Amino acid sequence: MGIDDFSQTGLVLGLGLSSPSSSAAAGDQKSKKPAAARKKTEPSLTLSLSGETFDQVRPVRKVDFDYNKVSCTDRQSADLYGQDSGASSFSNVSVKRERETGGEEVEIERVSSRASDEDDDGSNGRKKLRLTKAQSALLEESFKHHSTLNPKQKQELARELKLRPRQVEVWFQNRRARTKLKQTEVDCEFLKKCCETLTDENRRLQKELQELKALKLAQAPLYMQLPAATLTMCPSCERIGAENAAKSPFNMAPKPHFYSPFTNPSAAC
DNA sequence: GCGGTCAACTGGTGAT
DNA sequence: ATCACCAGTTGACCGC
């Protein structure tokens, strides 16, 4: 008996938790204490018309009691609400989703021996929810308009998508994280390029500096080409130094006047 | 089998 | 105290 067979009955068999509070969705709003909230809830088995009890579906935690609802959605709503509203949250049946060539998604039921084993010891690994294309599209569309949701928007979106508000909240959190990561990668690339550009510029300027130094050295008087250690500053050279500076090919700041120990300082001054 | 993706979780933090 | 958000992590699933 496959999902389709279930679906054709128009009934939903739900294994979940009945919260003492108004609804699981409302309890989920208090996201800071999900574990505690779950511990307060009671496992329940529900049978209802399809599409009525999606908000009872709870995520699976490895150490938590299996409070997943066992439900099947009808084929008409499979495209939008196909998986999490039931199929992907099966506690004893895992559902493999395959994409047909036309892009339409099909759900293939298969028995999971692991899930069966988990049933034996009462524990369960969490099942992977895959949002349908329609659900993702709607979430993306909503994300375009506002990257964060207020509680009302969250409730409304969850109702539209037939997901729990917590799932919508998680999707937005992860979506923001992905956006941020993507932006970080873009920034990183940009900074890399900046770094390369600056490195090239630095290299070019260093080279230019070397050339200017070489040029300056070539055009400097003989005494200026002598090592600095062999030069002594003339104590009374202000005027002459300034003149020399004015004659400098680089015409920079006035240079102090140096004289060679090999020349006569008094003659120079 | 392995790596990537992503829903879901945990623990921390700041705002109210 | 409660809530929303975030960073980091986990685990299921999928394609190769």
Image (cartoon, coloured by chain):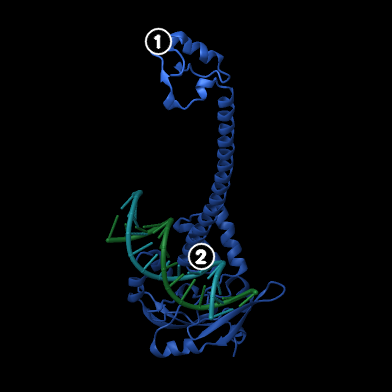
Chain colours: A blue, B cyan, C green
Residue A182 in which image quadrant: bottom right
Numbered badge on residue A66: none
Give the residue type at disc 2.
Ala
Q: Quadrant of residue A8?
A: bottom right
Q: Quadrant of the C terminus of chain A?
A: top left
Question: Quick one: A113 or A258, which is closer to the camera?
Answer: A258
Residue at 36% x, 74% y is A38
Identify the mark at residue A158; answer none if there is no mark.
2
- Secondary-structure class at tag 1: loop
Which quadrant of the view contains residue A229? top left
Q: Chain of mark 2?
A: A
Q: Secondary structure at mark 2?
A: helix
Which residue in the structure is indicated by mark 1? A236
Residue A223 visible in image: yes
The residue at the far right in this view is A102
Label 2 CA crowd tier, 10 Å (few <14, some 14–19, many 20+): many
Residue drawn at x 41%, y 20% is A232
Direction from residue A269 to residue A216 in the image, left or right: right
Up-down relation of residue A155 to residue A113 (above or below): above
Tell me: residue A100, above or below residue A267. below
Upstream in sequence: badge 1 or badge 2: 2
Residue A22 position within the rendered picture, expressed as x and y whole percent measured from the top left:
39, 70
CA gap, disc 1 and disc 2: 89 Å
Q: Are marks 1 and 2 on the same chain?
A: yes
Give neighbour class at mark 1: few <14, some 14-19, many 20+ (Cα, 10 Å): few
Q: Is residue A142 above or below residue A132?
A: above
Q: Chain of mark 1?
A: A
Q: Is residue A23 visible?
A: no
